[in-house]
Amino acid sequence: MIKKIGILTSGGDSPGMNACIRAIVRTALYHNIEVIGFIKGYEGLIDNDFVELKRESVSGIIQKGGTILKTARSARFMKEEGILQAVKNLTANNVDAMVIVGGDGSFKGAIELSKHISIPIVGCAGTIDNDLVGTDFTIGYDTAINTVIDAIDKIRDTAESHDRVFVVEVMGRDAGLIALRTAIASGAEALLVPELKHDTQSLISKMKNWRSTKSSKIIVVAEGDQSGGGFKVADMIKTNYPEFDVRVSILGHIQRGGNPSCMERVNASIVGFNSVRALMAGHKNEMIGIINKQVSYTPFAKAVKHHQKLNKDLEELIEILSS
Ligand code: F6P
């Protein structure tokens, strides 16, 4: 019987985390389960820094980006000493279940924690990268890709006016899923992502076929692509095509902020709500996600093996549709 749940947000923040926190808190309280929120992810667990969460603690946050519980990438939690301190605090506070909201690093942390404590732990996938197995969309991805296409649409206006080539670097140090969708949605001329392992030379040769009547060209590059990122790609283009007027735009952390989209708020609410239900039903060491509109449960160990293969057809689609 679960009486007290601890929650934390960890890793890079993502829009929709607050909607998820709200859903967890209100679902738990509905079932007469107390909730405490640890501050700054695993750091708060180690420092015993937490707040009690009441219904009103999560009022007016569903529409806000970021996370009211703050977040961190905890180096201390990667050491056994840190984990043991966290276990001590959880036991002293009578926490008998945990919900971790975060990405792959956060779930790897949850796996380590579960080796030292027997309380059930479940996760809600919160990362803009969408790089977890076991959910169609992670919390934050939809808002981030909409932020990106809004930015690329603006870049397209100025690129058109100046007849320029723009290399737009988007987030994703291990995954190209932000780049893939936003390249399609912005009508980009090319895409460079880590999963496709293209050498940049192939981009250079493809550029020969670009229609000369096209005034602007947009290349979307994921930050983790082996090309080395936006500036490197631009340098290579300048060397091979000195006639092109090239500019670089690194979108950076604006992709992590902003009010969550409607889809984000809904998904985050469903996932948060079901994380509490999952704990009550005896689930542990699983990530709660949504696949084909159905709630799904994926063991943490599987969820973190993110390298989803990119659909090669979509790469061809980008080339054909932008020709
Ligand atoms: O994990 C999400 C993410 O936004 C990645 O896309 C990006 O590489 C990374 O976080 C940046 O992290 P930080 O804000 O810690 O530099």
Image (cartoon, rainbow, N blue to C red):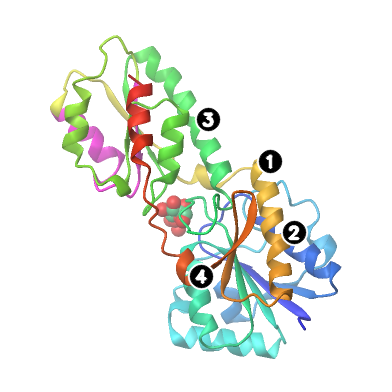
**Secondary structure category for the residue under label 1:** helix
- Indicate whether residue 223 is drawn in magenta: yes
Q: Report, in whole angstroms, how far the alpha carbon at label 3 lies from the one at label 2.
A: 28 Å
Classify residue 280 by image quadrant.
Answer: bottom right
| Image mark for residue 262 | 1
Residue 3 in the image: x percent, y percent? 79, 81
Answer above or below: position of 210 versus 310: above
Mark found first going from the N terminus, 1 or 3: 3
> Residue visible at 57% across and 43% down?
142
Looking at the rendering, the stretch of residues picked out in magenta corresponds to 217-239
> Can you say which quadrant of the picture contains the C terminus?
top left
Q: In the image, what residue type sits under mark 3?
A: Asp
Mark found first going from the N terminus, 2 or 1: 2
* Left or right of residue 135: residue 179: left
**Residue corresponding to mark 4:** 300
Q: In the image, what residue type sits under mark 1?
A: Cys
**Residue corresponding to mark 3:** 150
Q: In the image, what residue type sits under mark 2?
A: Arg
**Secondary structure category for the residue under label 3:** helix
- Binning the other alpha carbons within 10 Å of mark 2 as few (below 14), some (14 to 19) or many (20 upward) gives many
Mark found first going from the N terminus, 4 or 3: 3
Q: Report, in whole angstroms, how far the alpha carbon at label 4 lies from the one at label 3.
A: 33 Å
Task: Classify mark 4 as within 8 Å of ligand 1 or not, answering yes or no.
Answer: no
**Secondary structure category for the residue under label 4:** helix
> Residue visible at 26% across and 20% down?
245
Pointer 2 with pointer 1, Cβ within 8 A: no
- Indicate whether residue 198 is drawn in magenta: no
Pointer 4 with pointer 1, Cβ within 8 A: no
Q: Nearer the viewer, residue 277 or 123?
A: 277
**Residue corresponding to mark 2:** 22
Classify residue 319 by image quadrant.
Answer: top left
